Image: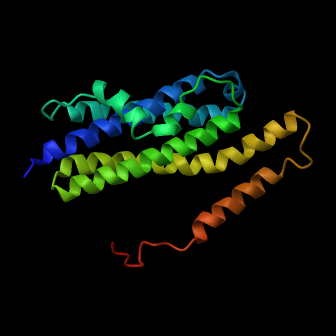
Amino acid sequence: MKDAKDILRPYVADMAAVEKHILEAIERQRTDNDVKELPQALQLVSRLETTLKRHVDGLESHLKQFDGGSVAGAVKETVTGVLGVFAGIYDKVRKDTASRMLRDDYTALNLAAVSLTMLHTTALAVHHQTTADLALRNLKELAPLIMELNEVIPHVVVRELAEDGRVYDAAVAQQAVRNTQEVWQTSPSMAGAGTTF
C-alpha cells in the first residue's frame, strides 16, 4: 500500500498548479485599464491576487515536504490535463471587458474550490491532517471571494452597458444582486440528504 505522502504528492502539485495558473491571469487583469477604472472590481482583483499568491506559496512550501515534490513539472501537465479546454480560453491574452474577466475569474475560482474540496477529502481519507487543514483553510479563503464576485459582477455589467448607452435603469444592478443572492440562499441543500454513492 502506498504511503499517504506518495498518494497526496500529485494532488498537492496539481492544486498548486491550478492556483498558480489562475494567479497569472489575475495578475494580468490587475493592470488592465478597464479593471482599473472600476474601483470595486480592482479592489477585488487585488485581494484575489494576494490570496492566490499566499495559497501558491503555501502549497509549494507544503509540497517540499514530499519526496520528489515539485510544482514546476506539474504546471504544464495540470494545465493541459486538469484545466483542459478551460485553460486555453482563460489563458489567452485577449482584450475582454471587465465583466467577462470577472466571469472567467468566477469560473476559475470555482474550479479551484472543488479541487480544494477534493484535496481535503483525499487528505482526510489517507489520514494526512496537515494537508487536509491546508486545503480547508484555502477553501475558506476562496469562498467569500467567490461570493463577492457574485455581488460585483452585476454592477460591472450595468456600468459597461451604461457606458455603451444601452441601459435604461442603472439601479437594476442592486436588484440583480439581491435576486441572485436569494437564489443561492434558498436553494435546497444536498448536505442533509444523506446521499451515498
Q: Residue at x 41, y 33 (%)?
A: 80
Colour mapping: rainbow
* Rendered position, 173 above or below 10: below
Q: Position of residue 152 (x, y in %)?
A: 66, 45
**Of residues 78 and 36, which is closer to you in this image?**
78
Q: Position of residue 142 (x, y in %)?
A: 45, 46
For the C terminus, the quadrant is bottom left
* Rendered position, 118 above or below 197: above
* Rendered position, 32 above or below 197: above
69 relative to 73 in the view: left or right: left
Q: Residue at x 12, y 32 (%)?
A: 67
Taking the image as drawn, is residue 40 in sight? no
Please state the total of marks drawn on the protein image: 0
Task: Find residue 61 and report its image quarter.
Answer: top left
Task: Find residue 90 and report its image quarter.
Answer: top right
141 relative to 163 in the view: left or right: left
Q: Position of residue 172 (x, y in %)?
A: 82, 53
18 relative to 133 in the view: left or right: right
Taking the image as drawn, is residue 24 in sight? yes
**Of residues 109 and 92, which is closer to you in this image?**
92
Give the residue furthest to the left: 1
Q: Residue at x 65, y 22 (%)?
A: 32
Q: Residue at x 76, y 42 (%)?
A: 157
